[in-house]
Image (cartoon, rainbow, N blue to C red):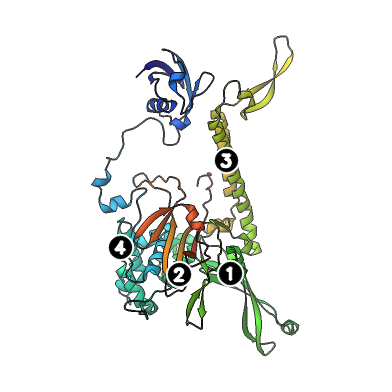
Amino acid sequence: MATVNVIIKHQGKKYDVEVDTTSTGEVLKYQLYSLTGVEPERQKILIKGGQLKDDTDLSKLGLKPGQVIMMMGTPGEGGGAIQRPTEKIKFIEDMTEAEAAQQAGATPAGLINLGNTCYLNATLQALRSIPELQDALSKHKHTSMSEIPQLDITNQLKELFKLMSETQGGLAPLAFLNALRTTFPQFAERSRKGPGYAQQDAEEAWSQIVSQLRQKLKLEIPGEGGASQSVSFVDKYMAGEFSTTLECDDPAALEGGEQPTSSKEAFFKLDCHIDNQTSHLRDGLLSGLTGKIKKRSEVLGRDATYTKTSKISRLPKYLTVHFLRFFWKRDVQKKAKIMRKVTFPHELDIVEFCTDDLKKALIPVRDKVREVRKEEEDIERARKRRKKNPLTDGEAKEANTKEEKKPTASADGDIVMTETYKTDAEWEAEKDASLLAAKKELNALIDPELRKDDGANQSGIYELRAVVTHQGASTDSGHYTAYVKKAAPKDPVTGKVGTEDGNWWWFNDDKISEVTPDKIDALAGGGESHSALILLYKAIPLPDAEGAL
């Protein structure tokens, strides 16, 4: 191994470094990381008029003993001097099953199929993707005097989710299933094709479980005068509101003085109606917001057809979308499946379906979100260009670090225009400050009434978090599974949250696998293969007053 001792100069300090000339620039960067605490990707080592690249062959640099090399860069968040861990290191093999299940990157628990219970397993996995629900359930206490805890669906869901958080294996949800079948006997229907229980509709299970949670799962929130008040978890986080208008189609009713009526009504899911014109989620949602009903007209003195038009006046933080893929087929006396392909987005902008008043509150925030994202993308592209094409002294004058020309006086008194340049650190600081200011502006645009409602969507934009799918041709056959987007890793000790990798967990009963986002795009339908039945969207996070998410 050929080595040479050089001097690395960084922030006024000098480091005597023994360089292995048979290695690469990346190896040297890690040496300097151990000395300075500056992560390799944040280091800028200037050598031979340019910047050292990771794949640079050090033997070709002609390093000489005592040569001084300049290094720039500062430690990132959490960087700096290497410190002794405050917590004793515990290896995975020494952890309990519960401790291992709570580590960052741990595979989540699966649910065993107890005989045509895949509809329930998929539903439970999608509901479990709501962290606020897990938190609320952990604090829930069974208080009903008329219902035993073993038959309380909310209490059993609490116990099941607790067990699921403590293992990476498969669990049999027997207690919860028993409570569900006791409360809703439809799920105890026996199969007509043989022994055992019949297959059920996952959407019906979803709706019945949510209805129970709405009744039983309460939150204590601050009220007026400092007193706390109890609200339903579902009403706060999962319920939206329609502003509905009902108008008679018969002109004679209007001529007779009958006026359209307006009302408010809660909703817990949006229906995506599917016909031969439906190709995208938007088409189905739009169709579902307008309908015809028959009712008696007091003015006409008979039944008449009315048009019911709904617009959204409150958007919940968690929005459920149901694809109406099943319909009753009389000739075979069962629910058949509509196979048509209907695409859906990973990010849903729902502003167009809202009332005018809600649009006025949402549009400024939505548009600012897009501005901030574009700025983030532009900055990231610039960073990649700079990293891919590091500047040399001769190239610097062509760089985007150039500042405006400034007048200076020459030796003979003439005014000369000169150019000044920002360092990489100055450029980074300026971009970070600009982005932070934009995020603060975004927070300031949030409507005051929406700001008070932390269970509502304040931008009108949703991100897809879970999908319940069905494979087969009818509700009483086939197979249900769930896809849940992987949450950002969270350190169980420090609580620090990392960044999401964009992948998804596929829950096929107790078989769990990791899949890429393109797998979700393939769930649009078009045949008997897995197609989306239920979508769970979550409001995108917005920065706080300090610009932090």
**Measuring 57% from the left and 40% from the top, which residue is drawn there?**
435
Camera-near label (4 vs 1) is 4
Tag 4 secondary structure: strand
Dot 3 or dot 4: first in sequence order is: 4
Disc 2 versus disc 3: nearer the observer? 2
Q: CA distance from mark 4 to mark 1?
A: 39 Å
Asked if the residue under mark 1 is in contact with the one under mark 4, i.e. CB atoms within 8 Å, the reply is no
Q: Which residue is mark 2?
A: 472
Q: Which residue is mark 1?
A: 242
Decide which of 469, 455 is in the foreground and name it.
469
**Label drawn at residue 231:** none
Q: Which residue is mark 3?
A: 435
The residue identified by callout 4 is 171
Q: The disc labelled 2 sits on which kind of residue?
A: Gly
Q: CA distance from mark 2 to mark 3?
A: 48 Å
Q: Residues within 10 Å of mark 4 (few under 14, many from 20)?
A: some
Mark closest to the chain's N terminus, 3 or 1: 1
**How many angstroms separate mark 4 from mark 2 (CA)?**
25 Å
Dot 4 or dot 2: first in sequence order is 4
Category of crowding for the residue at label 3, using alpha-carbon neighbours closer than 10 angstroms: few (below 14), some (14–19), many (at least 20): some
Q: Seen in the image, is 7 located left or right of residue 249?
A: left
Q: Residue furthest bottom?
A: 301
Name the amino acid type tagged 1. Phe
Residue 403, given in percent of the width and then of the height, sits at 65, 27
Which quarter shows the N terminus? Answer: top left
**Would residue 101 be found to the left or right of residue 432 on screen?**
left
